[in-house]
């Protein structure tokens, strides 16, 4: 194998494992994204292998930590393709990291399926790039409608992360929908990832008296923003998107987050048998831990990929790509997964309310 560099030679069928790559932030400021996804993927693959694998072979996942960094994402995906010679790749969570890695996968002809990146640009990289979640034009609309119709607020401030394709996109999509409904954006402020002090932006936001603040960032900064907002006397609800979903959010933000709302991919409170069975097996496997959305999406993305390999009848990357493209009505934990002509899934979203560290179900919004 070592002498065959440059061509994607697969091991002969029936002889060995089917290799799948996985990349994510296992360390760094978004570490729960990669860790949670990894737990979901590992659980799915364990179930698949216990049931005999796929095409008579066991599935093996090669995981790489990109530290939540776009350059590192590109490096580890290159390694998965050229050194490990995986047939397909799962990842990333953060849209900027998926956007950095996707061109490598596209140029190498290796399918990449992101469980959770919601920025529309990710799958626009090319026909080898897929996602099993909804996209941010929809997620932005969900929170705009929730603010306008359910919270009945008309004046909202925005505080966005300028280094994140996800945050920039979601802020814009929210703004478009909210203004189209007749709402007013009182201010539109920004910060950079890894900032620790948000008092200048929050002071400016406060001076315009918004009835809510939309903060479409990731949990580490959002937790700090919530604390600092309360200290500065901003008592209105903060709202956000799926990037809030982490057990660390409450650890960082604490009570400042009570009465805040965010959109997400699923709710653990959902009584649906598929969700409850998943939550129970996950807790059994992982010492009572409650699966967040990334664990559920990680579980679903591994099952969707293996289903495509089964339908392709081969671990040839191009056959897998073609099978992925026809994924239809796959029964996932996070809902039925059908990929449209843009290789995106069309699925409902939920709105959750933070109550003493719990994420309580508020409503479901259909696409
Ligand atoms: N949707 C986010 C992004 O595109 C990632 C994310 C998904 C974070 C799900 C948390 C939960 O960057």
Image (spheres, rainbow, N blue to C red):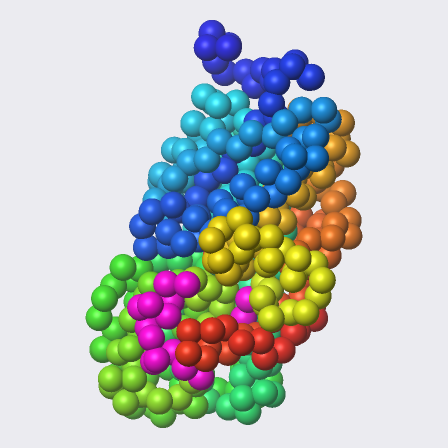
- The x and y percentages for residue 101 are 46, 40
Quadrant of the rendered image containing residue 244: bottom left
Q: Position of residue 208 (x, y in %)?
A: 34, 90
Give how far across and how far down residue 48 sits, in percent.
Answer: 66, 37
Part of the protein shown in magenta: 247-264
**Residue drawn at x 37%, y 70% as measured from the top left:** 250
Left or right side of 169 for 304: right
Looking at the picture, tell me which residue is in the foreground, 245 or 182.
Answer: 245
Instruction: Let me know if residue 226 is in the magenta part.
Output: no
Q: Nearer the viewer, residue 40 or 148?
A: 40
Residue 51 against residue 340 in the figure, above or below: above
Where, by quadrant of the figure, is residue 232 drawn?
bottom left
25 lies above or below 8: below
For image coordinates 44% across by 44% down, the residue present is 24
Q: Is residue 131 visible?
A: no
In this rendering, would 323 be left or right of 34?
A: right
């Amino acid at each position: 194998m070592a002498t065959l560099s440059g061509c994607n030679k697969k091991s002969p069928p029936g002889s060995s494992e089917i290799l799948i790559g996985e990349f994510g932030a296992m360390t760094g400021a978004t570490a729960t994204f990669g860790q949670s996804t990894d737990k979901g993927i590992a659980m799915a693959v364990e179930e698949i292998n216990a049931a005999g694998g796929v095409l008579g072979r066991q599935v093996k996942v090669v995981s790489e930590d990109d530290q939540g960094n776009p350059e590192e994402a590109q490096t580890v995906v290159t390694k998965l393709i050229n050194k490990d010679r995986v047939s397909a790749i799962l990842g990333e969570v953060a849209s900027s990291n998926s956007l950095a890695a996707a061109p490598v996968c596209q140029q190498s002809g290796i399918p990449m399926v992101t469980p959770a990146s919601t920025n529309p640009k990710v799958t626009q990289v090319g026909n080898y790039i897929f996602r099993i979640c909804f996209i941010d034009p929809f997620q932005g609309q969900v929170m705009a409608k929730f603010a306008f119709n359910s919270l009945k607020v008309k004046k909202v401030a925005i505080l966005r992360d300028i280094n994140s394709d996800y945050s920039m996109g979601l802020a814009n999509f929210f703004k478009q929908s909210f203004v189209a409904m007749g709402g007013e954006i009182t201010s539109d402020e920004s910060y950079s990832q890894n900032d620790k002090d948000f008092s200048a932006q929050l002071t400016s936001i406060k001076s315009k008296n918004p009835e809510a603040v939309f903060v479409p960032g990731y949990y580490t900064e959002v937790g700090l923003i919530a604390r600092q907002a309360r200290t500065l006397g901003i008592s209105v609800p903060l709202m956000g998107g799926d990037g809030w979903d982490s057990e660390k959010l409450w650890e960082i933000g604490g009570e400042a987050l009570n009465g805040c709302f965010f959109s997400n991919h699923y709710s653990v409170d959902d009584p649906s048998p598929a969700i409850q069975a998943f939550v129970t097996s996950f807790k059994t496997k992982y010492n009572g831990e409650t699966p967040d959305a990334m664990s559920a999406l990680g579980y679903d993305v591994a099952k969707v990929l293996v289903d495509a390999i089964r339908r392709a009848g081969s671990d040839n990357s191009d056959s897998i790509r073609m099978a992925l493209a026809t994924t239809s009505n796959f029964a996932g934990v996070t809902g039925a997964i059908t990929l449209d002509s843009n290789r995106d899934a069309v699925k409902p979203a939920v709105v959750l309310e933070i109550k003493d560290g719990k994420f309580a179900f508020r409503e479901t919004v259909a696409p």
